[in-house]
Image (cartoon, rainbow, N blue to C red):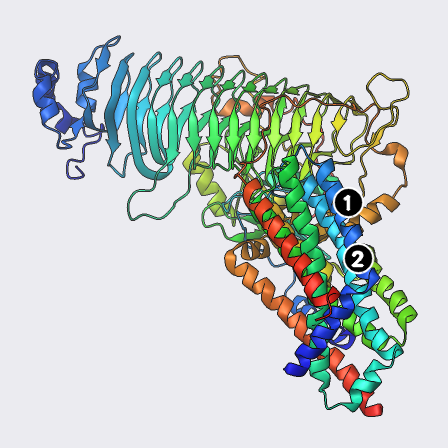
Amino acid sequence: MSDMLQVARREIKMGFRNPWAYSFLGLFCTFSLGLLLINSQNVVQGYTAVTGSMLSLILYLLPLMTLFLGSFSLTSEKEEGSWQLLSTYPIGTLSFILGKYTGLFVVLLAIVAFGYGLMGMISGLIGVAFDTGTYFLFLAFSAGLVLLFLTLALVIGSLSRNRWQALTVSVSVWFFTVIGWPTFLIAILGLLPYLWIKPLLVTLTLLNPAELVRLFVVIKLGGGSVLGPEYYQWVEWIGRPDGSLLFMGVCLVWILVSILAVYWIWERGRKRG
Amino acid sequence: MKKWSALFILLMGLVIVTACGAKKYEPLAIDEAVDICVICNMQVKDDAFATQLTTKDGKNYKFDDIGCMNEWKKQNGTEEIGMDYVRDYNDKEWIEFSKASYVYDKSLRTPMAYGVVSFKDTAAAEAFVKEQGVGTVLTAEELASHEWKQNTDMMNMDMHGEDSHMDGHMSEDQEGTHSDQEMDM
Amino acid sequence: MVTTRTTWQTASRVRRALIPLILFFLIMPVSYGTVRANTKPEAIPLQPIIDAANSGDTLTLEPGTYLGPIHIDKRLTISGGGRSTLLNPSPKAEVAVLIRSDGVQLQNLNIQQDNDGEAAAVRVEADQVTLKNLSIHTAGFGIVLREASGAVITNNKIRWFIPKGSAAGTRGNGIDLYNSHGASISKNEISYLRDGIYLENSRNTKVDQNRLSYLRYGVHCMYINGSSVTDNIGEYNVTGAMVMGVKDVVVSGNSFRKQSQNVHSQGILLYDVRTSRIFNNLVEGNRVGIFMQQSSGNTLRNNLVLRNFVGIQFEGAEDNRFQRNGFIANVIEAQASGSQNNELNGNFWDSFQGLDISGDGFSDLPYAINPFYQQLIEREAAYQLFFQSPGMTFLSDMFNSGKEQWSADSAPLLQFELETGAGTGADEGGGQGPVMVVGWLLMFVSVITILYMGVLRL
């Protein structure tokens, strides 16, 4: 446990000294404020064009930021040789990975919190009516997105040999999960029999953190009916308070499975030396 | 992760294959909360007027009136239909379209005013006609040459709206020239 | 009260009770004080009183509880003074008040109909009947008109009522017209029923200034040529106005809001509507603002489409004129498929960045409606899961084939003044304060974290 905290502390320190962190911070603040100003006459509440475009912006930016910062942190351990050094100490691989995960999460959360803090402040100053529930929902949505993509980032970082490889893989994963997703799915599912489409689509959506979190927020914003009759029972389910618990459960399973995968990769690497 | 998802997809696939191999073209229950008529957008009530059809690739369409199902057939043809169902007027049991008996009368009120109701056998249909005092009993084949005229207004009659039941048949031939040729059952 | 079950069919018992009741009715104005003192809900059968009256009479009921069902077959004016309640305890009687004589007026009366299914509180089968200031609680239908022309139905309150211990049965319609032409339905308040105002085969009906909420369809019209639906307010219904199979109808000044719960919710649905005019309506916060299908030759002007998931949706709509409508803050502004020859111009689309070279306030670039998503989900409804997913937007933008056939606004309006008061937005729950406080707090915490854990050497 103390090993884990040590690793986490070190990670946070390194994270805040990383210029990448601040460039993403700047980007996030600029875009969110821009959106806020464009929509300054509108109320930010429920599922409307304002919240819809905010959702898209966050979906574009946060996963990319998380993937970059997370995977780079792991590859740099390899590149700079600090992992080789750490391996000689009696520190468990799991403590190392969990420490990394927590540390990075704190760094990313601080960036997100700064962005939202600024947004909340400015919206108060310029008099945008920002519904409290919507604000917290977005905050939770961003945190969830960061949590889930961070596990992906760790997987990428573990598998990549160096920073450039991590960069390439991160960008392709981001493109696949955020932008290319419907295109790929429609292309592939179109080849399958009709009755397969819906179950496969649902399964695959559960595997894509970007879609999973996005749909959760759309439903919680009250936009669930837009998903059509195919999903109305789910929408009703998630719309209820225990729906949030269910969603958190799914996220937890997601995180656990990926952390175990990362652990397995590193453990294998450690044994091979 | 990739291995897991591959396995999961495989499993899902298996489940689906076994699921749809077993039962095909079964009539689905009407869910009033979400089912709307594919043609006219009205909510499909879980009543005797509801109809549905399942295409050969498994798509299910529900209708609030037999006339709307007929409209769908007119637009999409009947080749792709796996099975189509109507309901018995008395006990709401699903019956195959071709095996049901029908009663038409202009004065019968149905959700989209096509005035056709369905029965599981001719006896039930004849009993209904006797009870109502109006109506013509039709088989599914005879329905193919039916005109599907909606009782939309009393325009062909005098303006006082004094429509007695039987004079509907006289105005029947004035509109609706398209008898449905595609419905070769 | 349930023990004295009299229906108007059981004539003999009525006749026996008739004489004392006539006496009672005559004495009543005199002994006003004593009747009031007797506050116990002694239900008075109403039918004998009606039977005793002559055609053309005006009956003013004393405050109290009356027993139905009643059958009015002569030209009477019955007024309840607002404090009289008519019960219909007989489960056999489908109708609490049956009106079969022309020119009857019924007003200021509370009516309670415990029977559900097809049972109605008031059923009218005669012309020129007036129903005013009634307050109806029904487990079935509210007011039903059959072959009844020229009715005037104003200021009534109709809502759903569940008798104690019985399950929610099938709700009926609030006001239901069939083959009843030229009715005027105004200023009624209808809620928690199936359809608020259902009109079938009823020409030249006026539906004006009604308030409709928590219903399946607020106004549901089928085959009602020449009618008008104006200045109604609807909230939380599945669909505000369901207009189907009509010609020459006017839908104007209505406000339909917050109809987004059901997967088929919409503000106004126009199906098979011809040569009608739809103008000055406000649709706000609905799943789909205006949905137009298989309709032609209509004019849609000056409608305000605010904060809907989908602003307007066209499917097989042809030869319609669509001008000067305002689209603000809709998640998707417009969807169109299979819709040709519509004349779209001068609408305001808030997400559209136009270019005005000529300086006339209209963009010289057209606003085209991308049909990709709609075509996709028409083929496969399961893909609705991709609604406004960033990837879907990306894919739609790449899809550009046949652009010349897309529905497009040839000259979009570039500036749009929102009238004050129109579409004031959602319930502003005083969200600014907490959000600002939390904002400060978050800033503070994050800055401290960054400084302490990252920058400072501790």
Q: What residue type is labelled 1?
A: Tyr
Identify which residue, C89 or B144, lies in the foreground: C89
Residue at 66%, 60% in the rendered image: C448
Q: Which of marks 1 and 2 is in front?
A: 2
The chain that hosts pointer 2 is A
Identify which residue, C273 or A46, lies in the foreground: A46
In this rendering, the answer to whether A252 lies above or below C34 is: below
Residue C214 seen: yes
Residue B12 seen: no
Q: Point out residue B111 in the picture as x, y percentages from the top left corner.
A: 54, 36
Identify which residue, A166 or B58, lies in the foreground: A166
In this rendering, the answer to whether B41 lies above or below A25 is: above
On the rendered image, what quadrant is the N terminus of chain A found in? bottom right
Badge 1: how crowded within 10 Å, few (<14), some, or many (20+)? many
In the displayed structure image, the side of residue C51 where residue B112 appears, left or right:
right
**Callout 1 and callout 2 share a chain:** no
Q: Name the residue under label 1.
A: C373
Label 1 element class = helix
User: How far apart are labels 1 and 2 at the CA level?
Assistant: 38 Å
**Image quarter for residue C351?**
top right
Q: Point out residue A88 in the picture as x, y percentages from the top left corner.
A: 79, 91
Label 2 element class = helix
The chain that hosts pointer 1 is C
In this rendering, the answer to whether C384 lies above or below C177 is: below
On the rendered image, what quadrant is the C terminus of chain A found in? bottom right
Q: Point out residue B68 in the picture as x, y percentages from the top left corner.
A: 63, 39
Q: Mark 2 points at which residue?
A: A22
Check residue B82 in the rendering and tell me which mark sits there, or answer none.
none
Q: Which amino acid does label 2 sit on?
A: Tyr
Residue at 69%, 22% in the rendered image: C417
